Amino acid sequence: MTPFVTECIASHPIFSVSLDGSSLVGSSSSKTVGPQDALAKFERLGRAKRRTTSRKASSSLKLSLGRLDRRIISAEFNGGHISSDGGVMLLAQVDEHFGISAKVATCFSDKRHPSYVEHSIDTLVKQRVYGIAQGYEDLNDHEQLRHDPLFGVALGRVESHHQRCAPLAGKSTLNRLEKSHRRDDSDRVDERYIKTEVDPNALENVFIDLFIANTPSPPEVLILDMDVTDDRTHGNQEQAGYNAHYKSTCYTPLYIFCGREMLVSRLRPANVDPAAGALEELQRVIPQLRQQWPDVMIMVRGDSAYARDEIMSWCEAQPKVEFVLAMGTNSRLVSMAQRFEDYAKADYLAARAAAKAALLATMKPEELTDEHLDALVPPQVQYGCFPYETLNSWSRQRRIVCKITYGPNGAHRHFVVTSWHSKQYSSKALHQKQYCPRGEMENRIKEQQLDLFSDRTSNHYFDDNQLRLWFHSLAYVLLNRLRDALQHTPLANAQVGTIRSKLLKVGTLIRVSVRRIHLAMHSAFAYQDLFALVHQRLSQMTLPSG
């Protein structure tokens, strides 16, 4: 505090002191009070005033909600320790069983002075991930959540170790945690304020380690789905740019899933090649999977953005690694698939003629229009394959599978390039059973963005946003582990947003005493039996192999 402020406070009439410590004229007390005593008294009065103001604001916030018959309906925020997040205890149970937060915490180095640390890295990671899983994606939400006793119970911190601190971390502390990721070529933050640092390589590998640990028996086939989505930005974020495909200013994160399991979430600028980083991630992920399961067959699947010679050549050089990738249509492919298009067209015209003849038996010719036939006759489909090599960009010839759909609007063509031989999969089987199921990955990305708000990359620095994306991805992993405990229940295939709204959002009254913590959950909760079943299953789960 500056000398000027000290003088102003110490000379305030309420203290009746002078700067030299002697009593002022008219003072009712003969005791000498120094400037430091005056400052201490000022601070105590300020704290008391803030507490009084807070209590008055809380007690005065009364809501009138109308009437029901003769009764007045009113509401106040004075119910005590009540939370709407009773299901966070299930998340804590899942986290403790699989050690997700503990593994993530080991990726951080903490350079804070131990005597000044109130919130450990493990607690901060849990608070951030649990908050996202419960629907609190903004750091500002934790300014109130830090006082939530139920979150405190889930994190193991009901009381603060310091009288001036809340039991849990506030937005500023969590914001400093999100600034732990810094590459050598990025803008540096002042290390006086950011005392934590994350090892990005170790954190990336946590996703693979968790997947391996949750897969006790060697799988026969692992299918790696790659895709990119848009993450729109609305400020001056570092490395944000305009993307013509998505027609917005955004980031373009790359995801790799194996079924429901997330293996990669890599934030990328918008102005990069659509396949940028995909090969590097495959070269990182596949060797780790191969080390764990030497004999497993791995198939790489993606859209036409990944039909690049370097990706396909690397997969072809690896043992037991195959690929199925979409191909963009061009004139050479259309010409080479013409005979399959002719077959589909002939089948459609024959079906159309047969339908017309059948309808004319019961209708007048003038009553039957082309629109009727367009609606009644289904499109005809033909599958085929042929060898193909680009003029310049490919290093070798590869198998192309085509699907030709011929309908009232003409031919629709779709091409797939694959390393599978025709003896292993026919054209129809490969397209239907090996390529088309990749659309399920779109649901995983929707969960990540719509239910877990992974597009809230609103930090200025790119690396901060990457670490934030990892936190959102960890929330997905946590909820996906909870979904594993929902097998053979109505929520077995539910999206994570549905699981949160139906299972995790439970009104709960918290009573804390010296000897026990009692959670009184909503008596009319619609999923009481399911909640109890999940708790029982989590309690009986065997520890993961990792």
Image (spheres, helix red, strand yellow):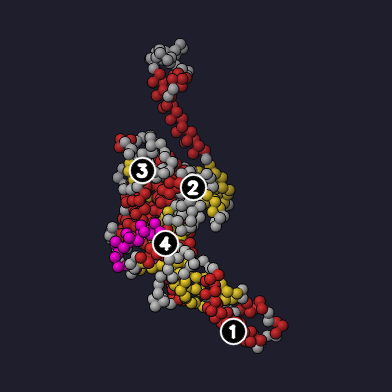
For the residues bearing labels 2 and 3, Cβ distance under 8 angstroms:
no
Label 1 crowding class (10 Å Cα cut-off): few <14, some 14-19, many 20+? Answer: few
Measured as percent of width and height from the top left, residue 223 is found at 39, 66
Distance, label 4 to label 3, CA atoms, is: 34 Å
One can see residue 352 in this view: yes
Measured as percent of width and height from the top left, residue 267 is found at 44, 52
Q: Report if residue 296 lies within the magenta region.
A: yes
Distance, label 1 to label 3, CA atoms, is: 68 Å
- Give the camera-side residue of 127 and 79: 127
**Amino acid found under the numbered disc labelled 4:** Glu
- Which residue in the rendered view is the most extreme toward the front? 392
Measured as percent of width and height from the top left, residue 270 is found at 50, 52
At x 40%, y 72%, the residue is 420
- Indicate which disc residue 197 carries: 3
For the residues bearing labels 4 and 3, Cβ distance under 8 angstroms:
no
- Choose the circle earlier in sequence order: 1 or 3: 3
- Choose the circle earlier in sequence order: 4 or 3: 3
**Secondary structure mostly seen in the magenta stretch:** helix
**Amino acid found under the numbered disc labelled 1:** Ala
- Please identify, in this view, whether the residue under mark 4 or under mark 3 is nearer the observer: 4
- Provide the residue span drawn in magenta: 279-299
Q: Is residue 329 left or right of residue 484?
A: right
Instruction: Give the labeled residue for mark 2.
Output: 239
Secondary element under disc 2, as helix, strand or loop, is loop
**Amino acid found under the numbered disc labelled 2:** Gln
